[in-house]
Amino acid sequence: MQKKRWSEDEVEILLQYENTAKSSYVLYNEISNSGYNRTYTSVVRKIDNMGLRKPKRYKTGKELRLGYLDIETSNLKASIGIMLSWAIKSRDKNEIKGAIIEKQDILDGVYDGKLVELLMEAMNDYDLLFTYYGTNFDIPFIRTRCLDHDIRFPVYREISHKDLYYMVRSKLKLHNNKLATVCQFLGIKGKTPVEPRLWREAMYGNEKALKEVYKHNVEDVKILEEMHKRIESYCPPTVNPI
């Protein structure tokens, strides 16, 4: 059976693979939606035969503002707990934005309102944020705290997000997928535990304890960037709306 030749329109769609963040699967869907009958396997094979490669991760025609986000909280549930601190590390820059809750805000019943507002301002400085298990914790926790304080949270597709936990889970086979385990395996130093007593003291505004929690927070975003750079070449640069 004679193979159907690829049309110029199809080739134009495939050329996006090299100069955008679109994955082969996204391009396959674009071809299908344009009325062409191609299988995903044939799309991948054609991309390979054309010699198309992504010259730089996350390149979309402009330099995306990339950041690594992590938060520390008093409880795993945002309807009970509050945010104690947050940190965002800008990729490839010696720049970390962050903030710690103030004791007076806890005593006054403001709790993490100001802290969450500062985080929202910082998040708007980025096009794409990376987290570790953020899909199930950081992002919904932040969204919930925003709703509690009537603070605007980014709407669908306003900021992109990639959860590196799922990258690790799909590309490595470790005895567990905790960030500490990944870093230990890769020889990345900096991941340290925080004593339970310290968390309790931080919850009630102990300034020394809060500084230790924030220090832990900052180290987490540093090692998250380092870990990501070690394994990102094995993964497609697909992202999700926040």
Image: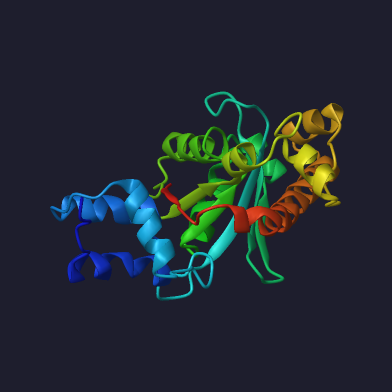
Lateral position of residue 241 relative to residue 6, left or right: right
Residue 78 x/y as whole percent = 55, 29
In front: 165, or 214?
Answer: 165
Residue 71 x/y as whole percent = 64, 44
Lateral position of residue 49 relative to residue 213, left or right: left
Residue 47, quarter of picture: bottom left
In front: 34, or 76?
Answer: 34
Tell me which colouring the rendered structure shows: rainbow
Q: Residue furthest left?
A: 35
Lateral position of residue 116 relative to residue 44, left or right: right
**Which residue does the image show at 52% across and 38% down from the upper left?**
135
Q: Residue furthest front?
A: 1
Q: Residue furthest bottom?
A: 62
Q: How many marks?
A: 0
> Vertical placement of 236 versus 198: above or below?
below
Instruction: Mark yes or no: residue 158 visible.
Output: no
Instruction: Mark yes or no: residue 33 visible.
Output: yes
**Which residue does the image show at 60% across and 46% down from the upper left?**
164
In front: 188, or 45?
Answer: 45
Residue 91 x/y as whole percent = 63, 66
> Vertical placement of 207 versus 95: above or below?
above
Residue 166, quarter of picture: top right
**Which residue does the image show at 52% across and 49% down from the upper left?**
162
Residue 226 x/y as whole percent = 73, 58
